[in-house]
Amino acid sequence: MNDISQYIGSGILELYVLGQTNAEETSEVERMAAMHSSVRDEIDSISQTLEAYALANAIEPDPTIRPFVMATINYMERLKAGESAAYPPPVSMESKIADYSQWLDHDDLQLNEPLEDYYAHIIGHAPDVTTAIVWLKNGAPPETHTNELEKFLIVEGTCDITIGSVVHSLKPGDTLIIPLHVTHNVKVTSSYPCKVILQRAAA
């Protein structure tokens, strides 16, 4: 086995592609790649193999994550701009839409533009609970909560929330509390977005 073959088989090229070589090792790999086409070819081959593996094992991100991150950023900016912190009442089986009218009736809390799929606007936050107005065009994918209770109060539209194998068909005024450790998903059944008060409380 010649020196180049030994170098290629040493594992250093895999570390280089993964970005785990130090400055000295990186310079050495790049010097060897400049001198030997077989080293360049091997680097290309490793890169393509790792890319193919990453694509084959990629996990589709939860589409609800980005809207909630953006809603959190928006809420923080509103507080910095002088908005007073608010503490909406807990969502319970006795909750009524009117309990949240001071937020629902705000002009700036109306959906005035086409909804892509999911939009959230945080109306209150405390260390153990976050409350938001959420619009769902189609629904939300399966998820399971292990440390927070998710509570729904339907404001407009209708939806089916499946918890385990049980389907709950909800209409305006209905509430539902999702238990821990049980997979659930939401499917909008109305021809227009389902608007809900969504509360996530630490369990």
Image (cartoon, rainbow, N blue to C red):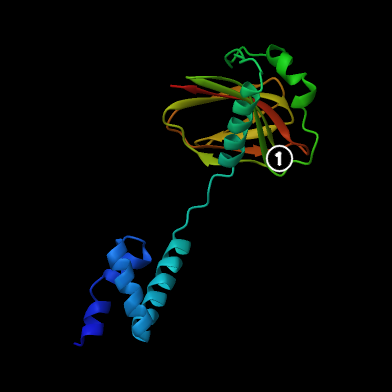
Instruction: Say above or below: 105 vs 13.
Output: above
Describe residue 32's horizontal placement relative to residue 106 as left or right: left
Task: Work out which quarter of the rendered image holds the C terminus and state it.
Answer: top left
The amino acid type, in three-letter code, at marker 1 is: Lys
All told, the count of numbered labels is 1
Q: Residues within 10 Å of mark 1 (few under 14, many from 20)?
A: many
Relative to 22, is 70 above or below? above
Res. 159 image quadrant: top right
The percent coordinates of residue 81 (x first, y second) are 66, 23
Indicate the quadrant where residue 141 lies.
top right
Q: Quadrant of the N terminus?
A: bottom left
Rendered location of residue 75, percent (x, y): 62, 27
Q: Is residue 13 visible?
A: no
Nearest the viewer among 154 and 34 is: 34
Of residues 135 and 28, the one nearer the viewer is 28
Pick out the residue farthest to the bottom.
Answer: 2
Question: Which residue appears at 47% of the width and 57% of the height?
Answer: 58
Residue 61: where, in percent of width, then height?
Answer: 53, 48
Q: Which of the 4 quarters of the picture holds residue 136?
A: top right
Q: Which element type, helix, strand or loop, lies under badge 1? A: loop
Instruction: Indicate whether 64 appears above or below 196.
Output: below
Identify residue for label 1: 137
At x 38%, y 75%, the residue is 43
Along the line of sight, which residue is nearer the eye, 94 or 201? Answer: 201
Residue at 48% from the left image edge and 63% from the top image edge: 55
Q: Is residue 81 visible?
A: yes
Whether 141 is drawn above or below 157: the answer is: below
x and y, in percent, of residue 2 in the image: 20, 87
